[in-house]
Amino acid sequence: MDKGGPVLRLRSFRLSLRFVLPLTLVLALCAYAVVPLVDSLTLRWFVRDLDVRSQLLATALRDPLLDHLSNAADTQTITALFNRVVQDERLYAVGLCTGGARPAYHSTTFPDSMDCSAGNGANALVALPQGRVHVAATA
């Protein structure tokens, strides 16, 4: 029978705690320090993805929109086109500004609180009542 068993286990447990607790503390501090960096990198990656997606969308819609505008298509036709486009899960709304403060044509999901100056012609994050959205403007 092992008479020193519980004492050895307690001593071994204390020795393990001397290494495990500082290691846990160091790992927790490193994770705490890295979270803002990862958050920033993730945000930049998503914004870049949305910028590429918006450029692709603008390029793909340019010819159909020019055809609809030159044929004096009604607003419903262009709105239907925009509503089909925003079925993509990453797109919230699409609008076409023709010089006025409000978009001349837009999808039904386009926020009433947003106008053509949103983002000041550049890509930006805009706070809406529904949450923050990335606004991309393409000429």
Image (cartoon, helix red, strand yellow):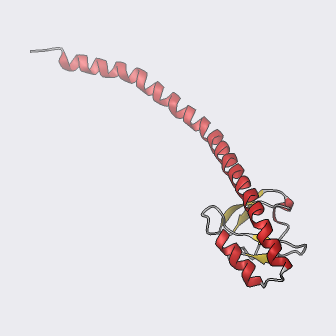
Rendered image quadrant of residue 108: bottom right
Determine whether 75 is above or below 127 in the image.
below
- In the image shown, does 104 or 117 lie closer to the viewer? 104
Residue at 31% x, 22% y: name it: 13
Residue at 83% x, 76% y: name it: 102
Note whether residue 104 is visible: no
Q: In the image, residue 36 lies at what x, y percent?
A: 64, 42
Q: In the image, residue 122 lies at what x, y percent?
A: 83, 57
Judge left or right: residue 93 versus residue 62: left
Determine whether 60 is above or below 65 in the image.
above
Note whether residue 73 is visible: yes
Residue at 73% x, 57% y: name it: 56
Determine whether 31 is above or below 73 in the image.
above
Which quadrant is home to the C terminus?
bottom right
Determine whether 97 is above or below 13 in the image.
below
Which quadrant is home to the N terminus?
top left
Q: In the image, residue 68 lies at what x, y percent?
A: 80, 77
- In the image shown, does 19 or 96 lie closer to the viewer? 96
Q: In the image, residue 25 lies at what x, y percent?
A: 49, 30
- In the image shown, does 7 or 58 lie closer to the viewer? 58
Residue at 57% x, 32% y: name it: 30
Rendered image quadrant of residue 18: top left
Residue positioned most to the left: 1
- In the image shown, does 63 or 138 lie closer to the viewer? 63
Count of marks overlaid on the render: 0
Residue positioned most to the right: 99
Judge left or right: residue 122 versus residue 2: right
